């Protein structure tokens, strides 16, 4: 049984950005993450060990959000790699990271970067 474990709308104040003021004062970010996995064993045995624990998934995202990076691409790549390293039963992971009100010189609700990483890629 292939399924998806997801967390949506995670919010963090973090210090990602190319410009010095972004790295000093920070900004608000939103993260959506989904992991495709086989959770047949977990469903049949009602056992958390056979699936992706979303508390652990949150901690992986939180740890990377706490490490300042210049590029959102760097952050999503690290999160995806950590997820696939943590759960051998994870087939793929999709991470979307959005910077709210990015400093682009105009009105913009959010800028986003999304990565989809499959095991073996």
Image (tube, helix red, strand yellow):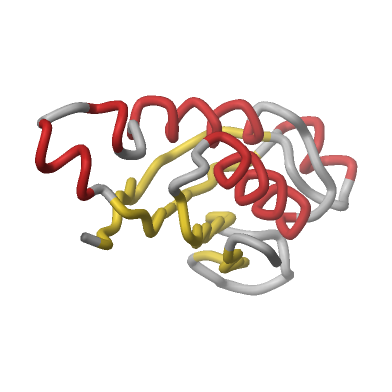
Q: Quadrant of residue 108?
A: bottom right
Q: Residue at x 43, y 52 (%)?
A: 33
Q: Position of residue 8 (x, y in %)?
A: 33, 51
Q: Position of residue 43 (x, y in %)?
A: 13, 42
Q: Position of residue 104 (x, y in %)?
A: 72, 68
In the displayed structure, does residue 115 sit left or right of residue 25? left
23 vs 77, nearest the viewer: 77
Q: Residue at x 60, y 64 (%)?
A: 117
62 vs 121, nearest the viewer: 121
Task: Inspect this view and state whether residue 112 appears.
Answer: no
Q: Residue at x 49, y 66 (%)?
A: 109
23 vs 91, nearest the viewer: 91
Task: Inspect this view and state whether residue 43 appears.
Answer: yes
Please determine whether, in this image, residue 41 is positioned above or below residue 35. above
Q: Quadrant of residue 106?
A: bottom right
Q: Give the number of marks.
A: 0
In the displayed structure, does residue 24 sit left or right of residue 9? right
Check the picture and name the quadrant holding the N terminus: bottom left
Q: Residue at x 60, y 60 (%)?
A: 119
Check the picture and name the quadrant holding the C terminus: bottom right
Q: Position of residue 52 (x, y in %)?
A: 36, 38
Please determine whether, in this image, residue 86 is positioned above or below residue 89. above
């Amino acid at each position: 049984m292939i399924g998806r474990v997801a967390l949506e709308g995670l919010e963090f104040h973090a210090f990602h950005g190319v410009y010095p003021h972004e790295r000093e004062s920070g900004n608000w970010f939103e993260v959506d993450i989904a992991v495709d996995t086989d959770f047949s064993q977990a469903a049949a045995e009602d056992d958390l060990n056979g699936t992706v624990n979303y508390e652990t998934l949150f901690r992986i995202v939180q740890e990377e959000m706490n490490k300042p990076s210049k590029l959102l691409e760097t952050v999503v790549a690290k999160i995806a790699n950590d997820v696939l390293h943590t759960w051998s039963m994870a087939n793929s992971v999709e991470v979307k990271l959005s910077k709210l009100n990015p400093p682009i010189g105009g009105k913009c609700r959010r800028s986003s970067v999304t990565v989809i990483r499959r095991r073996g890629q």
